[in-house]
Amino acid sequence: MLCSMGRDMSMEVRVEAFDALGKINVVSEDILLQTLSKRVLAITKEKRSLGQCPAEQFEILASNVAGVLVHGLEDEFYEVRKSACHSLRALTIISAEFAGEALNLLMDVLNDDSMFVRLEALETMLHMATFGHLNVQGTHMHMFLGTLLDSNLLIRSATRKILKLVKLSNIELFRLSFDSLIENLEKHPQDEADIFSVLFHTGCNHGKFVVSIINEASEEIDQASEGKLGFDSARVAALLVLAISAPLSHGEHVCSIPPRIFSYAVTLLGRISRALTDIMDQNALLAYLSQCSISTTFSATDLNIRRGEPCLPVANIEIPNDTSNEIDGSTRTSLQQEKDGASKLQSWTMREPLELAAPLGGFQVEVHDEVMKPINLILAKVKDIWPSIHSGFTNEVLRTLRNLKEELATFTSDSVGTIGAVAFTLQYLQVIKQLAKVWEHFLPAKKLCSSGLGELDLILGKLDMRLRELRSRFTGLSMEQELQILELVLLTCTLRLCKVEICCHFATLKKLSTTVSRVESILKSATIEPTIFISEVGKLLCLNETSRSEASCNPFKFKELLKHFSLSQFVLCGRLNQIKAELTIPDNDSENPLPFVSRLPVGIPCDITLHNTSNENKLWLRMSMDDESTQFVFLDLNLFGSSDEVRKFTYVAPFYKTPNAISFTLRVCIGMECLFEGVLSVKKYGGPERELTYLCQEKEVHLSMIGEH
C-alpha cells in the first residue's frame, strides 16, 4: 500500500508515503532490493516459482514494490526526492546488501539541483557509515569528494563528517581524499579547523598510509621549514596535521615519522589545537608534540589507553531528525568494532579524554567531572550548528538552541564550579541565539523592509549586552577562552561596520581598536595562534588607522571579513564562578508600601547577597521610576566585609527624587561596571563611568505618601 502511494498524483501524499517507508523496521531483504529495481529481480521470480506466494499476489506485490525508491529519487519535486533519501536512512541499516545498492543511487543524487536533496543524501550516507554499512568504492570517490568543493558550507561539512568514518582500502584512495581536502582548504580557507580535524582523525585510522605519504613528502616539509615555501602553504600545513596523527594510529606498528616533523608542527600549535578541541587542549597538544619531537620511534602502545578501545574516537557524527532541513537533535557517537564483528554504539559522552603515560613527562589531560562532560558536549553541538547559521536556517538553529537549553536545565549538580559552568553555557547559548538572528540580515537573499534596520540595531544591541555579561560576570576563564569571547566581540563590531545605515561608526571603530589591543596582549602572553578572522580584522584596522581615508572605512571591506569567520568550539575546563547578586526588599508589596514624604529623600531597605565579588568590582544600585528618571547609588564593597565567596548585608539606599504623588513604584536592581569598556561619553552626575551589566532581576518597591497608606 505504501509503495503504491509513492506514485500518487499528489506530491504531499508521495512525501508522506516515503516518510512512512522510512519508519519500517522489519522487511524482507528481497523486497528491499526490489524497491531499487524497476524490473522484477530474478530472485523474486524464483520465489514465485517455488510457490512461496500465490502468483496473483506476487504480481501485485512485485508491481507495487518494483523501483519505488528509484521513482522517489527521480521525482520532479525536490520535497519528494528529499523524503525518498530520508527513507533510505533507516532501511539501509536493515540490510548491508541493500545499503550497497542504495549507495549507487545516492551517488547520483549528489548531482541533484536542490541543495536540500544533496544534503539529505550526504546525511543518509553518514547514517550508513555510522552503522558500518557504507562501503565507498573507487568508482564512487570522485563523485563523493567533489562535494568538498560545493559552494554550500553545509554540504562540505557533511562530506567531511563522512570522511572521518570511512575506512579506505588502499593508499590511492587515501591520497585522493587527502588531495581533495587540500583543494577544499585552498578554495574555502574558512573551513581550516574542520579540515584539520578530519585529517587528524583520518590519519589515526590509516596510520600506514600516513607514514608512507609523509616519508615521500618529507623533503617538501623540510623546504618549508627553511623558508622556501613557508608553513602558510595549505598543503604543507595539512601534511603536518596528518603527520602528527600517525603515533595515535589504531595499529600496533611503530610510527616512523621523523621527529623533526613534530617540531615543525609546533609552529602551527594554535591553528591545530583549535581543530582538536574534541581530543585535547592546547597544553596537551604541546606536550604531545614535544615528546614526539625527541623520540626516534613512537607507537600507540606508548599511550596509557585501555586495550581494546581506540585511542581516539572513530568519528564525530550527528544524526538529524525528521524535521525538514534540520540538523539539531544530533547524537554524537563513536562506532567501536568488537572482536566478534558486532557493532556497539558507544556514547561520546562516556569517552575518557586521552591520558599520556609517565614517559610523556607525567603529563595528563584534565578529566572533567561527570557534569562537565555533557556540558562540553552541548558546546560541541553549538559549534556544529554554525553551518546552519551561515546558511540562514535561523528557525532550525533557534529550535536546536531551545533543545540544548532544555537539556542544560536537567543538570542538577550542587558543585559551585559546575553551577558557574552551567550558567556560562546558558549565557553562551543566548549569545549564539542573537548571533543567528543578526546573521540572517547579512545573507544575500535577505531583503529588509524599512523597519528591518531598526530591528537589526536592536538585535545587535542585545548581542553586545550578552557578550558584556560573558566577559564580566564569570571568573576563572583561561586566556584562550577569553580570546574566543573577544573574537565574537570583534565579529559584532564588524557586523555593525558592514551596514552603512547603522550609525555610531566612530564608537564602534574605537571599541574594535580597544578589543584588538586586548587580543594582541593575549596572543603575546599565551603564545596562541590567531584565527584567520582575527588576523584579517587586525590588518584592516591597521590599514584604517594608517590611511585615515574614507576608503579604508568602506563597509564593503568589513563585509569581506565575514567570510573568514567560523565559530570555534568552546571547551570548559577548571572552575568557573559566576558573579551574581540577590536583592530583596523586606516587608514590601502593594499592600505594605513604604512611607515617604513628597520631595524629601526616602530610605529603601535592601537585603543584598553577593556571590564571587571582589572589592575591585564597582557595583551600583539603579533605581528607576515609571517616567524613566533614574538614580544611581554606589555600593562601596570595602564597607561590607572581605571578598568572600558569599557575603550578605543590609543597605538602606537613599532615593532623592520622590515625586509629588500619592504613591509610586520604584524598580531597583544591582549593576556592575564593565571595567574593560571605555568611559561613557555622556555620564550623568554621580552615576557609573562605564556600561553596566546587571547581576539580578529588577525588584519593584512600592511607596505611598505618609497619611495615605
Image (cartoon, grey):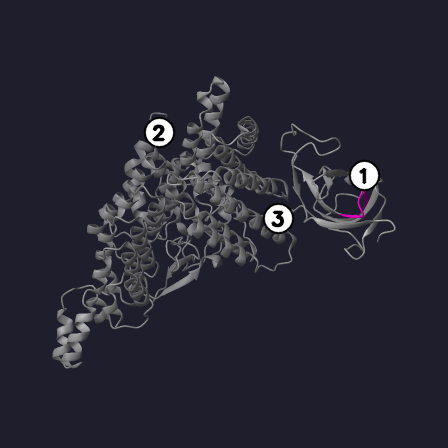
For label 1, the residue is 656
For this rendering, which residue is in front, 577 or 301?
Answer: 577
Residue 129 visible: yes
Residue 529 visible: no
Give amino acid for label 3.
Arg
Closer to viewer: mark 1 or mark 3: 1
Q: Label 2's element?
A: helix
Residue 224's tag is 2
> Is residue 599 found inside the magenta-colored segment of the image?
no
- For the image, the number of numbered tags is 3
Q: Label 3's element?
A: loop
For this rendering, which residue is in front, 33 or 635?
Answer: 635
Q: Position of residue 95 (x, y in %)?
A: 27, 67
Q: Is residue 594 above or below residue 22?
A: above
The part of the chain drawn in magenta is 651-664
Q: CA distance from mark 1 to mark 2?
A: 71 Å
Give the side of residue 92 with respect to residue 275, left or right: left
Q: For the residue carrying disc 3, how many other residues have a C-alpha within 10 Å: few (<14), some (14-19), or many (20+)?
A: some
